[in-house]
Image: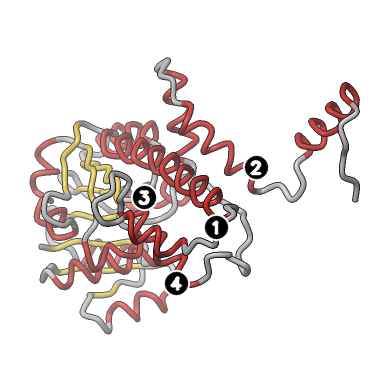
Amino acid sequence: MDLGFIGLGRMGANMVRRLLQEKHHVIAYNRTAEKTQEIMTEGADGAFTLAELVGKLEKPRAVWVMVPSGDATESMIAELLKLLEPGDTIVDGGNSNFHDSVRHHAKVAEHGVNFIDAGVSGGIWGLKIGYCLMVGGEPEPVKRLEPIFRSLAPENGYLHAGGPGAGHYVKMIHNGIEYGLMQAYAEGFEILHAADYKLDLAAIADLWMHGSVVRSWLLELTVSAFSQDQDFNQLRGWVADSGEGRWTVQEAIDKDVPAPVITLSLLNRFRSRQDDSYQAKVLAALRNEFGGHAVKTE
């Protein structure tokens, strides 16, 4: 099947590679020409302008956009709308806010163009094991692109979740849950690391992968991380967030759904970015004021 693919970062390039393995015809484009040239050596057809990419595609065209959410996605969709024709389809595979995806669907529909939002999970491992795909959009264009979705996904790893925005909505909640799971693992292993026993954390994580109720792919990755250095001496405890955790918490607030675990896991990421927490200083000062409790000074 013909597919235009825009964005050849670590995840996007591997998605193209998986599609090539499944014998799809992929026309690849990246703003940095070197990445386009690299993927061409692996069997992709290359394009060095958006006009060239669109011109190489069979009608009705399908273009997958795999660029950062926000301004990059907004501008890419606007540029594509100048080139595409009624009946063509844009797939947004980035981590866009589902509200934006609903808006994009309405915007491109004014031009007769279809819009599909595809939540993608799998990271750098997707090339080997496949990508979990959560897809939103109208039934007809989704059905037409199912060969692409099924090639990218492992068995039972693709779902048409619902109408416009549903794919990115489900992916948003997926990432919110991921925040909570990762935080629970991090807290548990910190307690183990602080124990009076000299514990092999990699062995414990590996043990829990066999029959334990807490086994998961995240725990499997924990085994790999601990195998390198369980003290993480070369690693700073600075944790970013992609935005979807924030959106999940906001959706919980909007829907009056209590989500304390996800909310606190997000707030803990904010705490990780403070070299010395002002809040902690206030707490220490207050304890000293009311109880004469000891404080540490620099």
In terms of sequence position, does the residue under pointer 4 or pointer 1 come before the other?
4
Tag 2: amino acid: Arg
- Left or right? Give the position of 204 relative to 59: right
Residue 15: x and y in percent read 26, 64
Residue on which the image places disc 2:
271
Tag 4: amino acid: Thr
Residue 6: x and y in percent read 33, 61
Which of the 4 image quadrants contains residue 129? bottom left
Distance CA(mark 2)–CA(mark 4): 35 Å
In terms of sequence position, does the residue under pointer 2 or pointer 1 come before the other?
1
Q: Which mark is residue 94?
A: 3
Q: Which element type, helix, strand or loop, lies under badge 4?
A: loop
Q: Nearer the viewer, mark 2 or mark 1?
A: 1
Distance CA(mark 4)–CA(mark 1): 51 Å
Tag 1: amino acid: Tyr
Residue 73: x and y in percent read 41, 49
Q: Residue at x 90, y 51 (%)?
A: 298
- Left or right? Give the position of 264 relative to 155: right
Q: Nearer the viewer, mark 3 or mark 2?
A: 2
Residue 117: x and y in percent read 27, 42
Q: Which element type, helix, strand or loop, lies under badge 2?
A: helix
Residue on which the image places disc 1:
197
- Left or right? Give the position of 288 relative to 106: right
Q: Which one is nearer the viewer's eye here, 236 or 184?
A: 184
Q: Nearer the viewer, mark 4 or mark 1?
A: 1
Distance CA(mark 2)–CA(mark 1): 28 Å
Residue on which the image places disc 4:
32
